[in-house]
Each structure stands twice: as structure tokens, then as C-alpha cells.
Amino acid sequence: MLRVTQTKNTLLDGATIAEDLYTTPKDCEECFDSLELPGKNPTKLCPRSTFVRAGVLTTVRGSAYMEYGNTKVLAIVAPPHELMRASARRMNMGVINCFVNFAAFATGELESVPEREKHLGSMLTKALEPVVCRTEFLNFQLDIRVLILDDDGCLLSTAINCCGVALVECGISTYDLITASSACIYRDNVFLNPSAKEEELLRKHRGGHALAGSDNSSPTAALQEHGLITTASMDTFEQVAQCQQGGYLSPATYVKLLDYTLTINKSLRQIIRRVLTARVKEQHELDVREKAESALEDQRLAEIIERLKQQGLDDFIQTNIKEDPFVKR
């Protein structure tokens, strides 16, 4: 098994590395019994433990790193560049391309990685298109790359949040900050910010693998509510940028899960605003320090030029020549 050694990095102070890697549950019944069941109406409407850092890479203009529980995502945004295809130059809006890649140690299901990467890239593009002011870079395309370092559920919502921070760091014009979260229902239990185990149970249920020895093995199991909803929203305009649903949900349950995710999005928005505000203050302090150092260098250069005018070239050179005490004559 691959082992990861934790190293010190000042840019990622506060980041963590999970000791136990997630494995796909083999026994669905035992996996369900091991979960902490929240019931139909969860009372704790808040996000997971969240760590966000903007500008983690100095080689690119816009980058962000986010930990949402044990889910870890890195996003990179490059400045817009001209479209290469001649037929695409007639478009009246910019084009957004999102590319998602899993790290080799991010998941154990390597066979499904290419399909998941393509699906996540498509969903990420649809979520970010309403947020970016694409009318400001006509005939240009914006490339966004996402690297998934660890997957413990809420992968799409974490990627959307991380890309939103990276867009602001890159200086791309957006209509609002975008935040996203997930919620699911399974066997009359509502799970907010579902983990990888809970999402795996939903996938197996949708695939026809009901829990043995439970009511789900009956012919009416297909009618039981089960599904996952991921909502990306812009709170300033009270608009939903994207809402993805998988499974079977009644209209009342759908609205209830939607309200839960929107409430979590508002909490995430406050966290991201604090991170971006701290980033702006940090960048401002850095700019002030660089200006002070540049002004000091200009002052030193002005003093040297003034001395050169007063003493002349030969005297100036002679006064600045110092003998080496270690050299024997």
C-alpha cells in the first residue's frame, strides 16, 4: 500500500493527511449499520470541517486548495487564451473547459476513473458557466484544471467551491461567489455532506443491489426514496447555478433537500469570503513591502548618481576601491 509522509509546507498550514484510506464496502448491511443515522430531519445544518487556501502555486496565476473533511481538491485556472479552431471564433461568448483528473492514490476504483473524470468535468463546466462573465473574453477560452487528491464524498461540490476560489484568485470576472453542497436520503435517513460510504450505498441501491434481509429486497424497494442532490448557488442573486439529482425523490423530499443544501451554501460562502479577504490583505501587505524595497533601491541609486556627479568618474572609482587585507603585495 502506498504510504504518504506528511511534510511541512507553509502554504498549506492546517492541511491534513488521512491515515486510513477509504475502501469500498463489501457488505452493504454491515456498512449501513456502522453509519450514524441522522434521521429524517437533521438538526445540524452546517458544512464539514473546511480548509481553503488561495494562491498555493506560484507558477500559475490562479490556484486554490480545499479540504472538505477528508476530500482534498486542487484547482488551477489559467488566463483566457484565443480559440484555436477557426469555426469557433464566431462565438459571441467565451468558452469554459474543465478538466478533472484523479491522483493515482485518490481512489481504489481505477476502472471507473476515466468515466468519472469525464462526468465530473462536464458537470463542473455546467456549474461554472452561469458564474463567469463570458461576455468579457469573446473568442477566447478559459481552461480550468482540477486534481483530486482524496475522495471521501461531496466530490463535485468541493470541486465547485475550490474552482470558485481559484477564479477569484486569477482575476476572472464573475457575477458572484459560487458555493455548492450535497445531501442525500437513504432508507428514510437524510445525510448532509455524505461520505464516500454513503454515496457508495446509494450507487449500489440504484444498481439494483438492495440490502439483504431488509425491506429493500421486496419488489417495492424501487419505490422507496433514495437519491443524492448537489446544489451550486449564488446567494447574492438568490439563483441556483446548477442542481444535479440522482435517484428517486418525491417533490416534497426534493424541496427539503434543496433547502438543506442552500442553507449549507450560505455557511460556506461566509468561510470563503473570510479566506479571500485574508488573501487580499496578505497580497496588499506584500505589495506595500515590495514598493518600500523598490523605493529604498531607487534612493540608493540616486545617492550613487549624485556622488558620481560631484566627484567625477576617476575619483569615484578610487574611493570605492577597497584593498583586500588577505592579499600580499
Image (cartoon, rainbow, N blue to C red):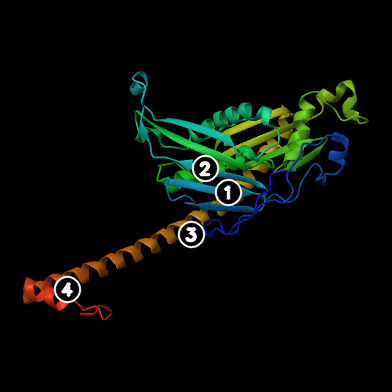
| Residue toward you, 252 or 249 | 249
Mark number displayed over residue 75: 2
Spatial CA distance of label 2 from label 1 is 9 Å
- Report the residue at 82% width, 28% height from top: 224
Q: Is residue 102 left or right of residue 87?
A: right
Spatial CA distance of label 1 from label 4 is 48 Å
Please rate how many residues cluster around mark 3, counting C-alpha atoms within 10 Å: few if below 14, some from 14 to 19, many from 20.
some
Please rate how many residues cluster around mark 4, counting C-alpha atoms within 10 Å: few if below 14, some from 14 to 19, many from 20.
few
Amino acid marked by disc 3: Ala
Which residue is label 3 attached to?
A: 278
Please tell me whether mark 2 sits on a helix, a strand or a loop: strand
Q: Disc 2 or disc 3, which is closer to the eye?
A: 2
Spot occupied by residue 39 in the image (x, y as percentages of width and height): 82, 43
Which quadrant is the N terminus positioned in? top right
Query: Mark 1 or mark 3, which has the lower sequence index?
Result: 1
Which residue is label 4 attached to?
A: 303
Q: Are marks 2 and 1 in contact (CB under 8 Å)?
A: yes
Q: Disc 1 or disc 3, which is closer to the eye?
A: 1
Amino acid marked by disc 2: Ala
| Residue toward you, 64 or 269 | 64
Spatial CA distance of label 1 from label 3 is 15 Å
Question: Image height check: is 179 above or below 281?
Answer: above
Residue 307 visible? The answer is no
Which residue is label 1 attached to?
A: 66
Please tell me whether mark 3 sits on a helix, a strand or a loop: helix
Spot occupied by residue 186 in the image (x, y as percentages of width and height): 79, 35
Question: Image height check: is 142 above or below 268?
Answer: above
Please rate how many residues cluster around mark 1, counting C-alpha atoms within 10 Å: few if below 14, some from 14 to 19, many from 20.
many
Spot occupied by residue 62 in the image (x, y as percentages of width and height): 44, 46
Q: Disc 2 or disc 4, which is closer to the eye?
A: 4
Residue 251 image-quadrant placement: top right
